[in-house]
Image (spheres, rainbow, N blue to C red):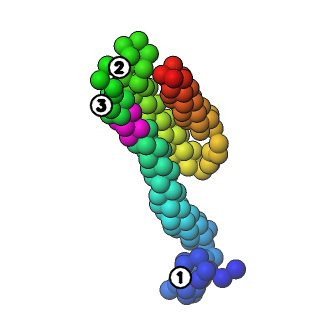
Amino acid sequence: MDDHAYGVGSLTTSDDGQSPLSSPDAAQDREATELHEYNNINSSAELNALERTYLGYFRTSLALAFLAVFIAQLFRLQHTPHPDPIFGFFVLGIPLSCICTGAAILVNLLGTYRFWRQQNAILRGKVLSGGWEMMAILGVVLVTTTLLFVLVVAVDITKD
């Protein structure tokens, strides 16, 4: 095995004529150096991957928050001169935007929790794949979009 491939250095002899790798202490030091360097390189790469993943969750929550603002502005500002006071776009604007804002906060919290879980797993030397957080975020987004679709269609049907 070539020690230069691991970046250990050259195999020179010490002052007593003994190879630096022949003593047990030197072998342990060499292994510790390799593990330390290996862990530093992977830890930063894994941390960057975790940060990119968290930013993906953050972007999803921002999209839901922007949708909430869009719904609030579109449904409340763009209304007929005499909107339906019981069931219409004007009445549903604020509740729907609140639901989207709550979904955005929930997605961000779940993304933060997943980042924390993955970081703790990496410190233990493990990697988590899948998990209930991803299914929960999928469920939140699907329920929110389905609810929006059903309510918009229901209001449109009652207007006709």
**What is the secondary structure assignment of the residue under circle 2?**
loop
Q: Which residue is mark 3?
A: 77
The magenta span reads: 66-71
Taking the spot 62% from the left edge, 48% from the top edge, the residue there is 127
Q: Which mark is residue 110?
A: none
Is 68 colored magenta in this rendering?
A: yes
Pick whichever of labels 1 and 3 is earlier in the sequence: 1
Q: Earlier in the sequence, mark 3 or mark 2?
A: 3
Residues at discs 1 and 3 in contact (Cβ within 8 Å): no
Which residue position is annotated with label 2?
83
Q: Is residue 112 left or right of residue 157?
A: left
What kind of residue is marked 3?
Answer: Leu
- 22 above or below 160? below
Badge 3 vs badge 2, beta-carbon distance below 8 Å: no
Q: Looking at this rendering, what residue extends furthest in the right direction?
A: 1
Determine the CA span between mark 2 and mark 1: 79 Å
Is the N terminus in the top left, top right, bottom left or bottom right quadrant? bottom right
Query: Which residue shows up at 42% across the image and 20% down it?
Result: 88
- Residue 9 got which mark? 1
Residue 63 visible in image? yes
Give the number of the mark in front: 3 or 2.
2
Q: Position of residue 47 (x, y in %)?
A: 48, 55
Q: Is residue 12 left or right of residue 130?
A: left
Q: Is residue 155 above or below residue 109?
A: above
Q: Does residue 116 appear in this view?
A: no
Element carrying mark 3: helix
Q: Position of residue 69 (x, y in %)?
A: 35, 35
Nearer to me, 117 or 152: 152
Q: How many marks can you see?
A: 3
Any magenta on residue 62? no
Look at label 2 and name its amino acid: Pro
